[in-house]
Amino acid sequence: MRADTAARIAEAIRAAESIFIAAHENPDGDAVGSLLALRSILLGLGKRVHAATPTAPPDRFVYLEGFEAISTDPPAERPQLGIGLDCDGSDRLGALEEALLAAEVVVDVDHHGGPETFGDIRLVDPTAASTTMLVMEIARALGIERPSPEQASALYTGLIADTGCFRFTNTSPEALRLGAELVAAGADPSELSRRVFTIRPIEAVLLEGRALSSLRLLEGGVAIASLALDDFAQTGASQELTEGIIDNFRDAIGVHAAALLKESEPGTWQVSMRGNGVDVATVAREFGGGGHTFAAGCTIEGSREAAEERLSAALQRAVREAASG
Ligand code: 5GP
Ligand code: MN
């Protein structure tokens, strides 16, 4: 079924001249990787491509071909084809949503399990480890068996970003096989894992220190930490430097669910959640967010204490439900 859908998308691509491709706000490695791999593939077919994310991508992905071409604006004209990438619902496209949905043909390419799929053609497969795996399906449907080294690097970036470099539960035989294929096509695994995961500014290390010193383990194995605006100001760290901090909490023995609250504006907290066999997507949805079963997020308003309190109560309930179910 996935191959059929990819073939329909390939047909739509062949039929279009102007194509608008966009990925979600606060784009991660999978969003940027799928956007730039697809951009390169479409340019190779001679298409006019406008690639955008509603908020600028993090600098750590500057090594990817086409990075500087990513816009934060919608295209000047109504596109013939609009392709949304890695979006759990079209609202993840923020200010670009309207322009994308206005395309003559709209395509949703995603691997989230949420109910909010969109568009005329929907290549949505929650069993895919990354959206870049689905972009590779589209490439195959277009007759591209071996991506260029630059395309392979972008596809591999998404694959390792979303599998935690082949460590998470979504690391399937298919994901590993695609990884091998992409390395054979020119993706450099050691360099790319360093780029995606290990190198970081000193401000990120200082910020992690603050997150760790705020970390508390509550009854039921719920770990909760928060970073207030002052923590960002004192360390000189930007919001995007919080990436990865939450994943370390989950690894502490005895932690069943973890949350990191990041204050983005006074009294507004962007929350990252992780579960160890605990469904945190349902908790995220309760607060108007979403995501994957074991990795989800939402936004909460209120004081630090109130936000932590509401969230930990919901997570403790989710832990109890996981234990009884
Ligand atoms: P992270 O904690 O790494 O930022 O996000 C984990 C997962 O939750 C990602 O798949 C991301 O798309 C999703 N997510 C994070 N924040 C939100 C949010 O505010 N709304 C929705 N719908 N999903 C979110
Ligand atoms: Mn993804």
Image: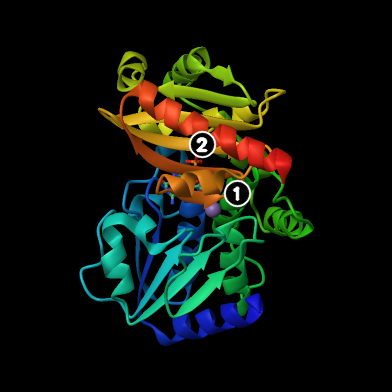
Location of residue 107 by image quarter:
bottom left
In the rendered image, the residue lying farthest to the right is 173
Do the CB atoms of the residues marked 2 and 1 lie less than 8 Å apart?
no
Q: Position of residue 155 (x, y in %)?
A: 58, 56
Q: Position of residue 200 (x, y in %)?
A: 50, 27
Left or right, 99 with respect to 195, comes to left
Amino acid beneath label 1: Thr
Label 2 residue SS? helix
Q: Residues within 10 Å of mark 2 (few under 14, many from 20)?
A: some
The residue lying toward the viewer, choosing from 268 and 31, is 268
Location of residue 87 by image quarter:
bottom left
Q: How is the image coloured?
A: rainbow
Q: Residues within 10 Å of mark 1 (few under 14, many from 20)?
A: many
Q: Position of residue 198 (x, y in %)?
A: 58, 30
Mark 2 or mark 1, earlier in chain: 1
Residue name at image x 50 percent, y 29 percent: 312
Reply above or below: 242 against 3. above
The residue labelled by disc 2 is 314
Residue name at image x 55 percent, y 58 percent: 112
Reply above or below: 59 against 11. above
Label 1 residue SS? loop
The residue lying toward the viewer, choosing from 183 and 165, is 165
User: Is label 2's Cβ within 8 Å of ligand 1?
Assistant: no
- Residue 277: in sight, yes or no? no
In the rendered image, the residue lying farthest to the front is 324
Q: Nearer the viewer, mark 2 or mark 1?
A: 2
Alpha carbons under labels 2 and 1: distance apart = 15 Å
The quarter in which the N terminus is drawn is bottom right
The residue labelled by disc 1 is 293
Q: Position of residue 160 (x, y in %)?
A: 63, 46
- Residue 3: in sight, yes or no? yes
Amino acid beneath label 2: Ala
